[in-house]
Amino acid sequence: MDSQDVSLRLVLNQIISRFGLRDVVDLPMYDILSWMGEAIRHIGGYNSLETTSKKVQVTNHIGKLPQDLHAIIRIEGYPKFKLERTHFVVPLESGEVNVIYDRFPVDEDGIPTIPDNPSMRDAIMWYVVWYLSLQDLLPNKLSPQYCESQWQWYCGQARAEGYVPSIDQWERMVNIFYRLIPLNNEYENEFKNLQDREILLRDRPNEYGVTFK
């Protein structure tokens, strides 16, 4: 976990303390964590994503999405695949595939982390509180309409602050756009070299057969 990230456990404790939920024994904790993930996806502009890979078992052409998934970058060997809510479909009846994807960073307990940004924490909090209000689980009886308005406000604020690229993302964009030789047909190569830095060799052919004098 990055030193500038905080665990969603902090947001959970924030919700429990601010809305008097310490004595509520039937809080839907699994749903709350799912709602937090939904809020992060709605906000977008998430700069602390990590790129990782995972071997996934495929049965009857279907593979289960990793739990910490944010977005699939590629599935090695299968440039074309269909993405569903909980799984993906590839032209492989059974076997194992390597999924390259962006994921949410997690803490030592496997709980996702987010940038230590007050607007983002408040936006996620109000998204969860909105859904709790819809299920009539708030002791103070805040209306769903009020909770939704707070979510919309803080979501916009967090989204605006989150679209500033990180250093890694800036370098990624530089490597993609500042090239003397464009990368053609990267789709067929599964975009493996798209983010690599261009290296120009003098007096001998480079990987594309071009010689620079």
Image (tube, rainbow, N blue to C red):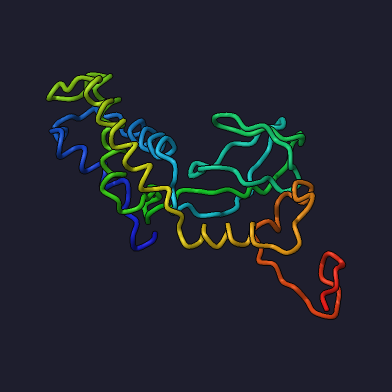
Q: Quadrant of the N terminus?
A: bottom left
Percent position of residue 185, x then y:
79, 49
**Is 190 placed left or right of 153 in the picture?**
right
Which quadrant would residue 207 be assigned to in this image? bottom right
**Is 184 placed left or right of 87 in the picture?**
right
Is residue 203 placed above or below 65 in the rendered structure? below
Give 30 or 7, whichever is nearer the viewer.
7
Which quadrant would residue 33 be assigned to in this image? top left
Percent position of residue 197, x then y:
66, 66
Give 25 or 172, whichever is nearer the viewer.
172
Which residue: 31% across, 41% down? 157
Which residue: 47% across, 62% down? 167
Q: Quadrant of the C terminus?
A: bottom right
Percent position of residue 174, x then y:
59, 61
Which residue: 75% across, 57% down? 182
Give 79 or 20, whichever is nearer the viewer.
79
Which quadrant would residue 15 be assigned to in this image? top left
Percent position of residue 184, x then y:
78, 52
**Is 142 placed left or right of 159 in the picture?**
left
